[in-house]
Amino acid sequence: MILLDYKDRRPIYEQIVDKLSDLMVRGILTENTPLPSVRSLAMDLSINPNTVQRAYLELERLGYIYSLKGKGSFVANPEQIRNFKQQSILEELRLLTDRAVSAGLEEDALCSIIHTFYHKERSYTIHKGGQADD
Amino acid sequence: MILLDYKDRRPIYEQIVDKLSDLMVRGILTENTPLPSVRSLAMDLSINPNTVQRAYLELERLGYIYSLKGKGSFVANPEQIRNFKQQSILEELRLLTDRAVSAGLEEDALCSIIHTFYHKERSYTIHKGGQADD
Amino acid sequence: MILLDYKDRRPIYEQIVDKLSDLMVRGILTENTPLPSVRSLAMDLSINPNTVQRAYLELERLGYIYSLKGKGSFVANPEQIRNFKQQSILEELRLLTDRAVSAGLEEDALCSIIHTFYHKERSYTIHKGGQADD
Amino acid sequence: MILLDYKDRRPIYEQIVDKLSDLMVRGILTENTPLPSVRSLAMDLSINPNTVQRAYLELERLGYIYSLKGKGSFVANPEQIRNFKQQSILEELRLLTDRAVSAGLEEDALCSIIHTFYHKERSYTIHKGGQADD
DNA sequence: GTGGTCTAGACCACC
DNA sequence: GTGGTCTAGACCACG
């Protein structure tokens, strides 16, 4: 379900946050779906439960999940998550474009990369049918 | 020449690397130009010489400068630097576009951001001869 | 009779305590009224009997109900309950006012909030005879 | 500087957050004042550095402080902190008033408590002269 | 020295 | 069983 990259400079808990929120945005984890328990995910990933706990804490802080003592952690409203993620991606794009301008890149170079990407990926984005079965 | 932002979360040495490589790419620091000595730059910025040293090491590792013992550090080939920077920016754009696709963003949303940015910024990029005040 | 909010961060048993003591203070549950049995309330709310048991224990500890072995649990003196609740609310208000002073809030700001609240709510507090639907 | 209450049900890190943010709002800790280091505060309070770390993390998340690797943690803009705190206090007052109405308390009872409090405390609130010496 | 991350293992509250 | 908090101690990056 999740693959950690130990060569990645980002902390593990952050990778977990990204991976899980990605699954929510992609529609693989739907509203109110229970997440794996802190302990079981820690076992699966061979990491310390505290690290998973921290990732879940962050996800809850972001409003992506909600946790109930003694019950477990569950996916919150994916709609909000998507909106939030889109905004932050657009913000990152602004920063990146700024650097691109400084580096002397042309507008076309950037857009053409985006264009090819969208045409390469569109085949995958069809999977919009749906399971919600828990 | 360089203004540090102490509230920036990135380490100081990284800010120096970015600022200096930016000056090279913009053509303000040209090939074989001597960089300020580690000590003098540290004095200028009121920071620890170790920090400047680390920035220079990083710049050398990236191939942006070359150091001659007892002589100092000098700007390497700006052409290469520009290419290198452009490639890494394009690579980042690919990763970002991937995430944008996942988040359900449309191609137009991305390109329009880039478009507005280029039209907002172009006025600045013309006077490529000038100032060095950062 | 009681609606649980599973997204509420407070534990279930505490919600039950609050809801039930509220009904007593409002005069809907009068002195010596028998409460539903632990089992039946647990069934009604689709929760674990342990949780209901804990709520009843808490209510007894507070002196809001009294339990007779083999007979069930009954509402204690609502007058006392009301007094108790009022005192604890006033105590909380003192603590809150203390913090308000520290935060530089003016007396008027606080009182005006209370004022609007009372004028917004008074319409509801009149029909003190009625419904039991919570 | 800070006294922990181990009988308090709230976690220690939360008490630290409250105590420190209080000192900021009261004007005792002014903008850019360095906070005690994670380790030293942990020593002072005889608690684990991780617990202090968590409190600082929370304070940073709230925008009350900013932390610099290798430098320390510093007080952010107290103005913002005050506004934020005031809003949350007013929100708590709304919730409390709601409960007061349910418990049959009169508007006057609440306001008179606030009134006495403000007249008891006003003698203290004069200390607005102010050192900024670090 | 500083803050940030992680592990290992414990205890609590809740269900 | 679950999540939440805390401790003890380690390592890293940064200045």
Image (tube, coloured by chain):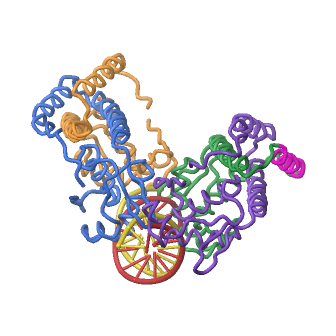
Chain colours: A green, B purple, C orange, D blue, E yellow, F red
Left or right: residue D42 versus residue C16 is left
How many numbered discs? 0
Left or right: residue F5 versus residue A32 is left
In the rendered image, residue F1, in percent from the top left (x then y), is placed at: 53, 67
Front residue of B72 and A11: B72
| Residue B111 occupies quadrant | top right
Left or right: residue A95 versus residue B79 is left
Magenta span dominant secondary structure: helix
Can residue D89 be seen at all in this image of the molecule?
A: yes
Image quarter where the N terminus of chain D lies is bottom left
In the rendered image, residue E9, in percent from the top left (x then y), is placed at: 44, 81
What residue is drawn where x is 9% and y is 36%?
A: D123
Front residue of E12 and D15: D15
Q: Does E8 appear above or below A129?
A: below
In the rendered image, residue A26, in percent from the top left (x then y), is placed at: 74, 50
What residue is drawn where x is 75% and y is 65%?
A: B77
What residue is drawn where x is 40% and y is 24%?
A: C131
Front residue of A42 and B7: B7
Q: Does D99 appear above or below A89?
A: above
Image quarter where the C terminus of chain D lies is bottom left
Q: Does A12 appear above or below A91?
A: below
Can residue A27 be seen at all in this image of the molecule?
A: no
What residue is drawn where x is 25% and y is 62%?
A: D6
In the rendered image, residue A66, in percent from the top left (x then y), is placed at: 54, 50
Q: Which residues are magenta?
A: A108-123
| Residue D11 occupies quadrant | bottom left
